Image: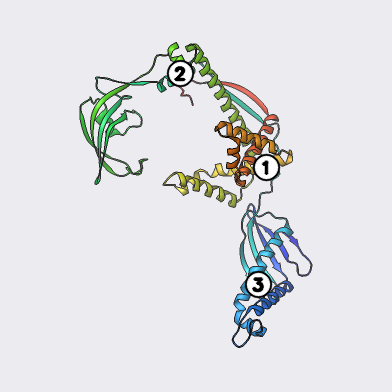
């Protein structure tokens, strides 16, 4: 218990430590200060009151007290408690991160005012062991097989659909006229295109359309599960009438010099493959560097673990849920709070720790760095710097930018002072690229 006794008319405060970063301030305002506040409020009411038989401000004080005693007591309490709480936090050098929960108020004219204020304070953590961190930088080796795989993805982008005179099969496209009957509503689509996807196609559609031919008509019903992603269809029965007009197959262009010229003006196929490989190598390096940064951050968190205040955790979760509700109609708040708790805790820990590292190492953000960030942002989004500055005049946005720059500088500091071991990895032949 930390206790401080002040001079006459000054409060007395004792701090009791609770779980984690919870603190209870036991505050006592001396009788003299309470009486002084009562006298000030009495005089205020006396000067403003209009009682029957008396001119404004001329009523006897004892009548004013009888008439307005409850209001006067409330005003005295509302005046004394916030001021006493503020003085108590200054006196004890505490930094609350939430509004106080005031309870157990003992208040009566002619006696000291006593109450308790429960708060949570900003964690007092001394960051340590953040230099000489050891991490492994694993970089994917780009093979010819992966280059060929990426080339085939590029060919897919330039593929054409050609009509065929055969039954439809998976990976074909159908051109159909479709009628959908849902309750009392009827929707009609002309020349609608359907991809026969073997992985993400409803069973009833697969059964009706695979092996179908141009000119055929299909009628079937689908009972959608309640968990279906489209909320307009989830849990409903829908009847479909489909007339197949064309069956089309995807035809990929040949991988040759002509294709290389078409997709990017390359001299030949070899030059295109080299460009693809350069891009894959660059991507692998970026991913490896991002993973190293994550390793460094995680090591700092693990070496400096501390209990996170409920106030900060709840604030993080509330913000996350609010963001999700803006994007999705249904949000399982209970599940999100459970699934994201560990992520939230690490995020809060890192936020406090990287600021401490910045303070200890005297890492700051200059106006020139903010200006450079704005210029880069403008270039990336093809905007004029003046227009970007107007968008970023909001103080909260500028604070976020400054925080992002500061965090990057702290991680760069960790990188410069870390021991990094490089390792090459190679994908298996059956492993899908990211």
Dot 1 falls on a residue whose secondary structure is helix
Tell me if residue 22 comes above or below residue 143 in the rendering: below
* Separation (CA) of disc 2 from disc 1: 47 Å
Counting residues from the start of the chain, the first of labels 3 and 1 encountered is 3
Q: State which mark lies toward you, 3 or 1.
A: 3
- The numbered dot on residue 343 is none
Is residue 174 shown to the viewer in this render? yes
Mark 3 lies on residue: 76
Dot 2 falls on a residue whose secondary structure is helix
Decide which of 223, 429 is in the foreground and name it: 223
Q: Residues within 10 Å of mark 2 (few under 14, many from 20)?
A: few
Dot 3 falls on a residue whose secondary structure is helix
Q: Quadrant of residue 9?
A: bottom right
| Residue 174 x, y percent position in the rendering | 28, 27
Mark 2 lies on residue: 263
Counting residues from the start of the chain, the first of labels 2 and 1 encountered is 2
Counting residues from the start of the chain, the first of labels 2 and 3 encountered is 3
Q: State which mark lies toward you, 2 or 1.
A: 2
Tell me if residue 111 comes above or below residue 379 in the rendering: below
Decide which of 177, 21 is in the foreground and name it: 177
């Amino acid at each position: 218990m930390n206790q401080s006794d002040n001079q006459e008319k000054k409060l007395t405060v004792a701090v009791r430590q609770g779980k984690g970063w919870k603190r209870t301030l036991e505050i006592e305002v001396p009788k003299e200060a309470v009486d002084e506040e009562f006298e000030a409020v009495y005089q205020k009411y006396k000067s403003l009151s209009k009682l029957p038989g008396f001119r404004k401000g001329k009523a006897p004080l004892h009548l004013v007290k009888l008439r307005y005693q409850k209001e006067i007591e409330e005003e005295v309490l509302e005046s004394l408690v916030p001021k006493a709480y503020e003085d108590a936090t200054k006196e004890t050098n505490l930094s609350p991160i939430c509004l106080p929960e005031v309870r157990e108020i003992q208040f009566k004219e002619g006696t000291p005012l006593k109450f308790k204020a429960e708060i949570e304070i900003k964690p007092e953590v001394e960051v340590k062991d953040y230099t000489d961190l050891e991490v492994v930088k694993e970089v994917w080796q780009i093979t010819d097989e992966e280059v060929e795989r990426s080339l085939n993805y590029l060919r897919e982008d330039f593929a054409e659909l050609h009509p065929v005179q055969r039954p439809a099969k998976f990976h074909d496209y159908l051109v159909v006229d479709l009628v959908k009957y849902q309750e009392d509503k009827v929707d009609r689509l002309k020349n609608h295109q359907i991809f026969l996807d073997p992985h993400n196609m409803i069973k009833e559609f697969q059964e009706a359309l695979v092996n179908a031919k141009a000119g055929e008509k299909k009628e079937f019903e689908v009972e959608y599960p309640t968990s279906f992603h489209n909320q307009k269809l989830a849990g409903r029965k829908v009847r479909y009438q489909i007339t197949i007009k064309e069956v089309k197959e995807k035809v990929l262009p040949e991988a040759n010099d002509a294709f290389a010229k078409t997709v990017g003006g390359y001299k030949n196929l070899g030059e295109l493959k080299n460009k693809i490989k350069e891009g894959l190598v660059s991507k692998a390096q970026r991913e490896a560097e991002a993973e190293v940064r994550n390793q460094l951050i995680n090591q700092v968190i693990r070496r400096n673990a501390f209990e996170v205040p409920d106030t900060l955790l709840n604030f993080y979760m509330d913000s996350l849920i609010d963001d999700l509700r803006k994007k999705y109609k249904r949000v399982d708040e209970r599940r999100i709070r459970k699934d994201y708790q560990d992520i939230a805790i690490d995020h809060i820990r890192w936020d406090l720790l990287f600021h401490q590292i910045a303070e200890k190492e005297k890492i700051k953000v200059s106006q020139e760095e903010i200006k450079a960030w704005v210029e880069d942002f403008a270039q990336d989004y093809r905007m004029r710097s003046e227009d970007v500055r107007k968008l970023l005049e909001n103080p909260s946005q500028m604070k976020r930018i400054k925080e992002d720059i500061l965090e990057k500088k702290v991680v760069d500091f960790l990188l410069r002072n870390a021991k990094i071991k490089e390792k090459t990895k190679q994908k298996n032949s059956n492993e899908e690229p990211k």
